């Protein structure tokens, strides 16, 4: 799959922008504040219906404007025109595919697979468990529609059960406990499905991590990915889930919080069997983040049969020359990629082929080289 072109109106700094792309590497070059990252953000919007940066759609509006529009043409076996229109006045975002409005994000996610490597990825290896869950949920959801719908349903159950726990805490109404038992059963059933799906995924995904790490660093370091669920591994997920939630029932009622389930799990990264988060250097963290995104790319390509779009935002400035060279060479193994950089002069190891595009952003105009 490739993105052939994109048009932006009132999106971030771009009042009006139209770009055509190579189906190979697209280097987006320009100084700070010229909207390089915004172009990647707009591509991510079309692939997922949401921003890769902003918490709300209104944050992506051009100054003093009340709407933005993103449109683009995807090409694979067929062609798909995608258009996103956001109105601040109506506080509404509309997503259109080939002129037909799509009302649910779940009907878009996975149709245009995308991988983004950005500075914020440091949260995956160095941040909270929720950052790692967000990463892995995103990868699995793009590859499995079943997982995506299970995740959506599980989150709905969490919200309902949380509301009920709050009601019980506030009203002391014991009749609500029977209703809580019903939601608890739903939580265990759907949560157990998610855990089993994650277990299968990690076993498969780990191979892609090891292969990408070997390509970038040979056998100097051996990576690992482990799934820590239900406060420790268990052969029978459902029984462990039931036992834990029974043991913590009084605490859940006291705190009015869901304390057991896949929304509390974590993923552990290791190098040479040492915990990366505890013992890893900054260079090892950054390399692992890059490896995770390459692994995501090749995993999605194999599982979906559709080549993802690869977005790399300001990656090379944080790596040493040796690792940057390896990554730039590895990029030749992906399909279409979009790479933001400030200056080619300082990155002489990036080799531009005849099929690549060098898109230079200047004040008020765009230049192709």
Image (cartoon, helix red, strand yellow):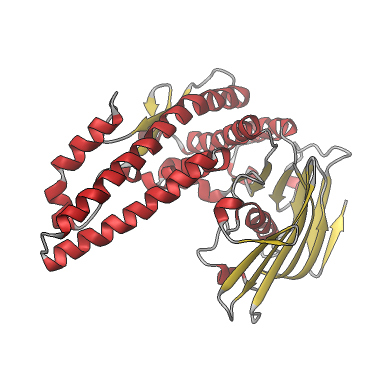
Residue under the image location 37 percent in, 44 percent down = 129
Q: Quadrant of residue 267?
A: top left
Residue under the image location 64 percent in, 79 percent down = 66
Relative to residue 255, is residue 149 drawn left or right?
right
Q: Is residue 269 depicted above or below 218 in this figure? A: below
Relative to residue 69, is residue 289 drawn left or right?
left
In x, y percent, where is residue 92?
A: 58, 72
Residue under the image location 46 percent in, 43 percent down = 124
Q: Is residue 154 depicted above or below 50 in this figure? A: above
- Asked whether residue 135 appears in the rendered view, the answer is no
Q: Quadrant of residue 164?
A: bottom left
- Asked whether residue 215 appears in the rendered view, the answer is yes
Residue under the image location 55 percent in, 49 percent down = 119
Disc tally is 0
- Please state which of residues 25 and 325 is positioned toward the viewer in this rendering: 25
Relative to residue 271, is residue 218 drawn left or right?
right
- Please state which of residues 246 and 270 is positioned toward the viewer in this rendering: 246
- Please state which of residues 18 and 237 is positioned toward the viewer in this rendering: 237
Q: Quadrant of the N terminus?
A: top right
Q: Quadrant of residue 368?
A: bottom right
In x, y percent, where is residue 169?
A: 15, 63
In x, y percent, where is residue 112?
A: 67, 46
In x, y percent, where is residue 279?
A: 37, 32
Residue farthest to the top, as pictured: 219
């Amino acid at each position: 799959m490739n993105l052939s072109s994109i048009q932006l109106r009132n999106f971030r700094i771009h009042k009006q922008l139209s770009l055509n792309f190579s189906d190979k590497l697209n280097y987006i070059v320009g100084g700070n504040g010229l909207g390089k990252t915004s172009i990647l953000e707009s591509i991510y919007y079309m692939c997922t219906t949401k921003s890769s940066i902003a918490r709300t759609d209104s944050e992506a509006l051009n100054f003093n404007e009340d709407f933005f529009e993103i449109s683009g043409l995807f090409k694979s076996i067929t062609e798909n025109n995608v258009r996103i229109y956001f109105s601040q006045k109506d506080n509404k975002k509309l997503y259109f595919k080939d002129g037909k409005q799509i009302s649910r994000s779940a009907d878009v996610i996975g149709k245009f697979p995308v991988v983004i490597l950005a500075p914020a990825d440091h949260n995956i290896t160095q941040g909270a468990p929720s950052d790692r869950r967000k990463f892995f949920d995103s990868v699995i959801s793009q590859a499995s529609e079943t997982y995506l719908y299970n995740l959506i349903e599980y989150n709905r159950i969490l919200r309902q059960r949380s509301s009920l726990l709050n009601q019980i805490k506030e009203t002391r109404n014991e009749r609500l406990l029977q209703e809580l038992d019903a939601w608890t059963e739903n939580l265990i059933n759907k949560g157990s499905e998610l855990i089993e799906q994650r277990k299968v995924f990690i076993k498969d995904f780990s191979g892609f991590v090891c292969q990408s790490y070997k390509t970038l660093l040979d056998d100097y370091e051996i990576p690992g990915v482990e799934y820590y669920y239900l406060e420790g591994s268990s052969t029978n997920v459902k029984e462990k889930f039931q036992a834990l939630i029974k043991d913590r029932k009084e605490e859940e009622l006291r705190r009015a919080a869901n304390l057991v389930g896949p929304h509390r799990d974590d993923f552990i990264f290791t190098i040479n069997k040492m915990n990366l988060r505890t013992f890893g250097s900054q260079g090892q963290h950054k390399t692992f983040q890059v490896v995770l995104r390459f692994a995501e790319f090749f995993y999605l390509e194999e599982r979906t049969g559709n080549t993802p779009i690869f977005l790399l935002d300001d990656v090379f400035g944080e790596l040493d020359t040796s690792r940057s060279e390896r990554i730039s060479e590895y990029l030749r193994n992906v399909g279409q990629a979009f790479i933001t950089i400030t200056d080619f002069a300082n990155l002489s190891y990036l080799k531009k082929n005849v099929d690549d595009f060098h898109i230079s952003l200047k004040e008020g105009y765009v230049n192709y080289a």
